[in-house]
Amino acid sequence: MLPNTIGQPRRYRRAEASAYLKSTWGIDYKPATLAKVASLGGGPRFELAGRFPLYPEPELDSWASARLSPLKSSTSDAGAI
């Protein structure tokens, strides 16, 4: 994790972003999977610092929140997403 400067969100390198998603949201995306969706699309938005992708924490939170379904009361509760 990179140091937080005043007024700036924390930014994570790919391995750290993977660990953050797992520990905070329970979403298990390996760094290689984040790399793949970074090239194909559909992953969390990121910035580049030279050749290194940096994932701002609010972007990880927004992306993870959108990946989760509404609460279910049973496994047969398909519900509309």
Image (tube, rainbow, N blue to C red):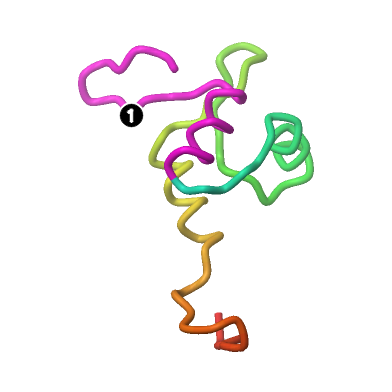
Mark 1 residue element: loop
Q: Is residue 64 above or below residue 50?
A: below
At a point 56% along the width and 15% down the height, the residue shown is: 49
Q: Position of residue 47 (x, y in %)?
A: 54, 27
Residue span colored magenta: 1-24
Q: Residue furthest front?
A: 74
- Which quarter of the figure is the N terminus placed in? top left
Q: Left or right of 33: which side holds 59? A: left
Q: Quadrant of residue 10?
A: top left
Q: Nearer the viewer, residue 7 or 63?
A: 63
Q: Nearer the viewer, residue 36 or 68?
A: 68
Q: Position of residue 14 (x, y in %)?
A: 61, 25
Q: Which residue is tagged 1? A: 9
| Residue kind at label 1, given as amino acid type | Pro
Q: Left or right of 81: which side holds 1? A: left
At a point 46% along the width and 83% down the height, the residue shown is: 73
* Residue 47 inside the magenta-drawn segment: no
Q: Is residue 50 above or below residue 12?
A: above
Q: What count of labels does the image hold?
A: 1
Sort mark 1 into few (<14), some (14-19) or many (20+) by Cα contacts within 10 Å: some
Q: Left or right of 32: which side holds 59? A: left
Q: Position of residue 7 (x, y in %)?
A: 22, 25
Q: Quadrant of residue 81?
A: bottom right
Q: Residue furthest left?
A: 6
At a point 56% along the width and 86% down the height, the residue shown is: 80
Q: Is residue 40 above or below residue 80?
A: above
At a point 69% along the width and 35% down the height, the residue shown is: 30
